[in-house]
Amino acid sequence: MYIAGKSDIGLIRSTNQDNYLIVKNKDNDVLALVCDGIGGSKAGDVASLSVIKFVGHAFSNTEAFSSAVSAKLYLEKVIRLANDDLFAKTLESEEYSGMGTTLVGALFLSEHTLVVNVGDSRAYTLKDNELRQVTTDHSLVNDLLQNGQISSEEVDNHPQRNILTNALGVAHSLKIDILEINNYDKLLLCSDGLSGYVAAEAIKDTLKEADALESILSKLINMANNAGGYDNITVIVAERGEYSNE
């Protein structure tokens, strides 16, 4: 497969609290992660980088997985360990109190792709020119939507749209969604700096292009900045083919 990632501070924020990772293990399986730090001045950038480093180091030292099931169990275990590590850091000082991070990722095995999600960063697939969000946002507005308390038209402008119901580092307990996604042409991982400001149709049209992945990444980030650049923007795009990460 081909895979590439890019992160941008945007036009408003003074720091970039997003971090991303593309790493191989000893069997050349590939793990890609996007983490979006939360907590504002409460070291959101420290939180996202801490999880990226923890999971990246652990994964790079793993051997081959015997099955998709064993890979799923591994993902859940390492993310829970990363959460415990981050939660402990929040107790170390007032500076770190309240920090946390979302996490969305994909583990690419030879015959399987596993998507993992905590929070409201997203994974999308493109197949036959159709874009599909495959992750479920762990957010208050999504809960309100699913419960019928607000309409889909109210989501984007809801005053509580940024409130998460799940994130790493905020508690010992953690909800981790892991699903298998194998039927796709391209897979997109992104922070809400993209999905929160760029329409799905525009994302789809860009992913449909036959450009190099680096060009697609730049176009997606430029669209988010053209929409105001109100948040940090991080994107990873993978497509079927031989592994390449320049």
Image: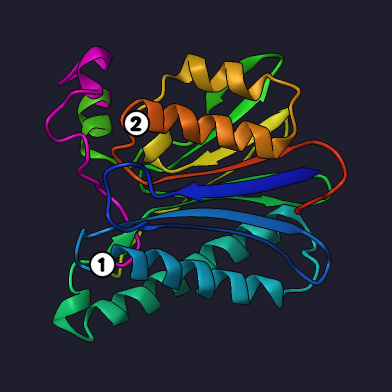
162 relative to 210, above or below: below
Secondary element at tag 2 = loop
Q: Quadrant of residue 22?
A: bottom right
User: Where is residue 127 shown, x and y percent of the image?
Assistant: 69, 20
Q: Residue 155's image quarter?
A: top left
Which residue matches tag 2? 196
Magenta highlight: main SS: loop
Among numbered discs 1 and 2, the one appearing first in the sequence: 1
Q: Is residue 150 left or right of residue 9?
A: left
Q: Secondary structure at mark 1?
A: loop
Q: Where residue 225 sits in the image (x, y, percent)? A: 39, 33
Q: Is 28 displayed left or right of 77 in the figure? A: right
In the picture, the quarter occupied by the N terminus is top right
Going by the numbered disc 1, the residue's amino acid type is Ala
- Label 1 crowd (10 A; few <14 / some 14-19 / many >=20): some
Which residue is disc 1 drawn over? Answer: 171
**Residue 151 in view:** yes
Residue at 59% in and 16% down: 205
- Magenta residues, start to end: 146-170
In the displayed structure image, the side of residue 82 where residue 146 appears, left or right? left
x 71%, y 14%: residue: 128
